[in-house]
Amino acid sequence: MIKWKIIINTMGKLLFFETIFLVLSLLIAFSYRESDANSFLWAALITAFVSSLCYFPTRNVKKDVGKREGYIVVSLVWIVFSLFGCLPYIFSGAIPSFTDAFFETMSGFTTTGSSILNNIEELHHATLFWRSLTQWLGGMGIIVLFLAILPKFGVGGRELFAAEVPGPNPDKLT
């Protein structure tokens, strides 16, 4: 049986980390005094709010992540991160179409290298930083990056590792 509360709790924790990365872009926008600072502020606030809605009602759930939950989290995190990650593009007007903004963000998190942008160099510093950050996070593997952090919050990393990394059984790596 799938433990949906654990999945929601884990997604809340992961969205908190996406909020941190949005705030980093916000700091870049502030440092360059760019007009898209409000875009990153609103994106970070919305992401933090949804993160709280996912985390706080489920914070007392027993953190027993199984393989099913691991696979679901890995699948959902790309979609959910892209949904919230496209907000700065939409709010700033850099990519006004939701479909294009979602595609650009998903392309970053999956490191496909595809882009709908013609003149990337014309983006504001913060937007360019965010775009680069999505690609960096995708390259690191969104879940693999958090494997060192999630166990400290009571989320088992082995199941998430098994869902993210193809190849040998992670039980044989220890």
Image (cartoon, rainbow, N blue to C red):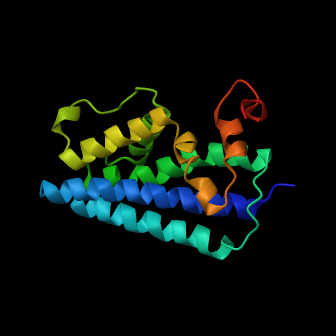
At x 66%, y 39%, the residue is: 161
Image label count: 0
Residue 104 seen: no
Q: Quadrant of residue 23?
A: bottom left
Question: Is 168 above or below relative to 123?
Answer: above
| Quarter in which the N terminus is drawn | bottom right
User: As drawn, is 29 to the left or to the right of 81?
Assistant: left
Residue 81 x %, y %: 50, 50
Determine whether, in the image, residue 57 is placed left or right of residue 98: right
Q: For this rendering, which residue is in front, 174 or 42?
A: 174
Q: List x then y, in percent, for residue 140.
A: 48, 35
Relative side of 132 to 108, left or right: left
- Answer with left or right where residue 124 lies relative to residue 137: left
Whole-percent x and y of residue 63? 73, 62
Of the pair 39 and 138, the residue shown nearer to us: 138
Question: Which residue is at the far left?
Answer: 33
Please state which of residues 95 and 62 is positioned toward the viewer in this rendering. Answer: 62
Residue in view at x 29 percent, y 53 percent: 25
Asked whether residue 53 appears in the rendered view, the answer is yes
Q: Where residue 125 sits in the image (x, y, percent)?
A: 19, 45
